[in-house]
Amino acid sequence: MPTDLRVERLTKEFRSPGGQSVLAVDDVSLEVEKGALVTLLGPSGCGKTTLLRMIAGFEEPTVGNIYFGERRVNDEAPNVRDAAMVFQSYAIFPHLNVFENVAFGLRMKRVAAAELRERVNRVLELVGLGPLARRSPSQLSGGQQQRVALARCIVTEPRLLLFDEPLSNLDAKLREQMRLEIREVQRRLGTTSLYVTHDQIEAMSISDVIVIMNAGRVEQIGSPQQVYARPANRFVADFIGKVNFVTASYEAGAVELGGVRWPLPDAPDLADGSQVTLVLRPEAIRLSRADTGLRGTVQRAVFLGSGAEYLVEAAGLGELLVNEPNPAEAGMRRVGDSVGLEPTPGSLHVLPDEA
């Protein structure tokens, strides 16, 4: 697939008020394939927004290069880079109605009136705002204002769409709805997109590729399934969802947990007897009768509606977090209950040695 965006060894250094050097982005390289939606995910202060702003042209790199296709854009102003950004604050004009907000970029480009009307109306229908074209922003909900901001960007048909935490001002239910709508619009248009968020669920649900960042550096690049099931290190495993870290002894493609041997799906090249750290997700542990598999005792039970979350003291392993679906059917287990624990096939992942 052709590449729409390439970032080579990008670094951004700021100076603190005391004159100290602060690396916001540290030697980041990245490629985004044409038509893909790639998410920059990480905790606050990890450098993801600074990286996005350098790509947009709002920040100047200290070191490194940015390419749109084969064109180096480091020295180009934001308005000529052929990228459009959807901001966290929407940044729509309060004195213009919905139609004129969306038309603004086309008017700046002096697009002919007939073409302008056709493009604006088409995009308003695409984002579900056709009947609201003459409303003012003050008459719109938060979700509708976000659709205006999205429509204003895509109507100019940019090479790249850049999203800077666009849903953080919405409530949880509307956020879930809007992220699915953004993904659907992006797929229908086929526009290459880079999306910044600190929300793991958001990143997992909309991305073709996730870039995990921490302290200005890239920790892992992969599909949502890869970064969740096969994290590159302890930080990624801990940041993406809930996790149990378990120490075990490795031998001949299997590990021993509580006196029971479990085969590994991707057996590492390790000497027999090596101690390894395993990633074991809470939903990848099945609870059963106490006389099967590993044994444990329920220490905490939390009803979550569609599931139940248990903290189980497992013999020889310490406390394990376990998620069980549909407690209404299976029945809630109680604190003090004895249970068996069994990792589901293929769920065990050995972390690389980070020493």
Image: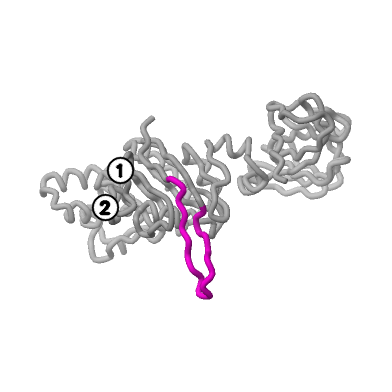
- Residue 73 vertical position relative to residue 19 in the rendered view, above or below: above
Q: Is residue 328 visible?
A: no
Residue located 34% across and 36% down the image? 190
Q: Residue furthest bottom?
A: 18
Q: Amino acid at mark 2?
A: Leu
* Numbered mark located on residue 132 in the image: 2
Residue located 40% across and 51% down the image? 163
Q: Position of residue 50 (x, y in %)?
A: 45, 57
Q: Position of residue 279 (x, y in %)?
A: 71, 39
Q: Is residue 244 visible?
A: yes
Residue located 54% across and 69% down the image? 20
Residue located 88% across and 30% down the image? 291
Please tell me which residue lies in front, 276 or 115.
276
Q: In the rendered view, does 337 fall on the left or right side of 322?
A: right
Dominant secondary structure (helix, strand or loop) of the stretch shown in magenta:
strand
Q: For the residue labelled by badge 2, is the local secondary structure a helix, a strand or a loop?
A: helix
Of tags 2 and 1, which is closer to the observer?
1
Please tell me which residue lies in front, 99 or 255.
255
- Residue 101 vertical position relative to residue 339 in the rendered view, above or below: below
Residue 18 magenta: yes
Q: Which residue is mark 1?
A: 71
